[in-house]
Each structure stands twice: as C-alpha cells, then as structure tokens.
Image (spheres, rainbow, N blue to C red):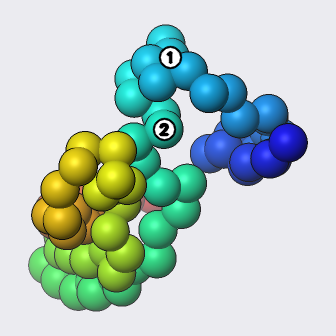
Amino acid sequence: MAWTLDAYGYFGEKTENKFSKNGYMNAFENNDFSILLAYEFLFSERFKAILRFNYGLKDITKNNYFENEIINKNINFKILISYNLY
C-alpha cells in the first residue's frame, strides 16, 4: 500500500485505475522540482509588474506508461500586474 500527499495536504491511498475523475493519474509523477526566476519592476509607489519564469527539473511523465522516451518538463511564464489601493 502506498500513500501520497496531494496539493491539498490530504493523505490518500493510490488506486490502480488508469483513468480517474482527474484524468490519467498513473501516467504522471507525484512530484516535481523546479527553479524559479523572478523580476519586479516598480513603476511607481503603488504600481508594479512582476515577471516569473518556472522551469521543472524532472520528467513529469512515466515513460513506460506512454511507451516512449520523451522528456516532459513543466515550464511556466507569468506576468503579474499589481496596484496597491492604500
């Protein structure tokens, strides 16, 4: 019996179903490690923009499930705009 910790902090028992209500859960790894780079632009005392780049370090898919050797990593780029009311 294996236990996992999901994004909500709930300990649940792994199932052997290939497809669940959330999709193909057995096809993906349970965790990932990443590097985060961020830069903040201050336009004024109240207005700023933030750039974030996140690069995953692990292959997030189980290649034996898909029967291939393709490396799939998480890559995210975000632009955030912030305005302080007070």
Q: CA distance from mark 1 to mark 2?
A: 9 Å
Instruction: Give the residue at x 80% y 47%.
Output: 2
Whether residue 24 appears in this view of the structure is yes
In x, y percent, where is residue 11?
83, 40
- Identify whether 39 is placed above or below 7: below
Mark 1 secondary-structure assignment? loop
Residue at label 1? Answer: 20
Image quadrant holding the C terminus, namely bottom left
Nearest the viewer among 64 and 7 is 64
Instruction: Give the residue at x 30% y 57%.
Output: 63
Whether residue 75 appears in this view of the structure is no
In x, y percent, where is residue 12?
80, 34
Instruction: Give the residue at x 42% y 48%.
Output: 28
Instruction: Give the residue at x 23% y 49%.
Output: 67
In x, y percent, where is residue 82?
28, 59
Q: Quadrant of residue 16?
A: top right
Q: Quadrant of residue 37?
A: bottom left
Residue type highlighted by circle 1: Ser
Residue at label 2? Answer: 26
